[in-house]
Amino acid sequence: MSHNRLAIHLTNTEWGVSKETGECSKSHILAAEIINSSFLLKNMREAYNTFREILNSKDELRLDQWLEKYKSTKIKRIRSFIKKRLQIPLE
């Protein structure tokens, strides 16, 4: 599976699932196995999905909590994004 396709599955849990039947595609099943076998990928999925939910809810308190929770994550892109927004010096 290409990294681009995995990224789609990582950020969209419904990708590859039939809306009519609920049947999962082979790529959906493979992506789920890959993501579930990796602590880092599971954390990335959780961070992305909760961030998207918070933005859609427009809940500033939850956004502040999300920023606090993920500002020290091992996921460099997320940490960098947060620190730029909070204007915290990068380590």
Image (cartoon, grey):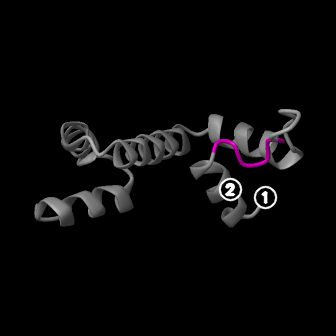
Q: Is residue 32 left or right of residue 45?
A: right
Residue at x 74%, y 64% (from the top left corner): 2
- Magenta region, mostly helix, strand or loop? loop
Q: Is residue 39 visible?
A: yes
Disc 2 residue crowd, few under 14, some 14–19, many 20+, Cα 10 Å: some
Q: Is residue 27 left or right of residue 40?
A: right
Residue 6's disc is: 2
Q: Residue 59 location in percent, x, y?
A: 26, 40
- The image shows residue 56, relative to residue 85, as above or below, that is above
Mark 1 or mark 2: name the one nearer the start of the chain.
1
- The image shows residue 74, relative to residue 39, as above or below, that is below
Which image quarter holds the N terminus?
Answer: bottom right
Residue 1's disc is: 1
Residue nearest the observer in this picture, 17 or 21? 21
- The image shows residue 11, relative to residue 36, as above or below, that is below
Q: The magenta stretch spans which residues?
A: 13-18
| Amino acid type indicated by mark 2 | Leu
Residue at x 52%, y 37% (from the top left corner): 39
Callout 1: helix, strand or loop? loop
Residue at x 20%, y 66% (from the top left corner): 84
| Number of callouts | 2
Q: Is residue 91 visible?
A: no
Residue nearest the observer in this picture, 53 or 78? 53
Q: Are marks 1 and 2 in contact (CB under 8 Å)?
A: yes
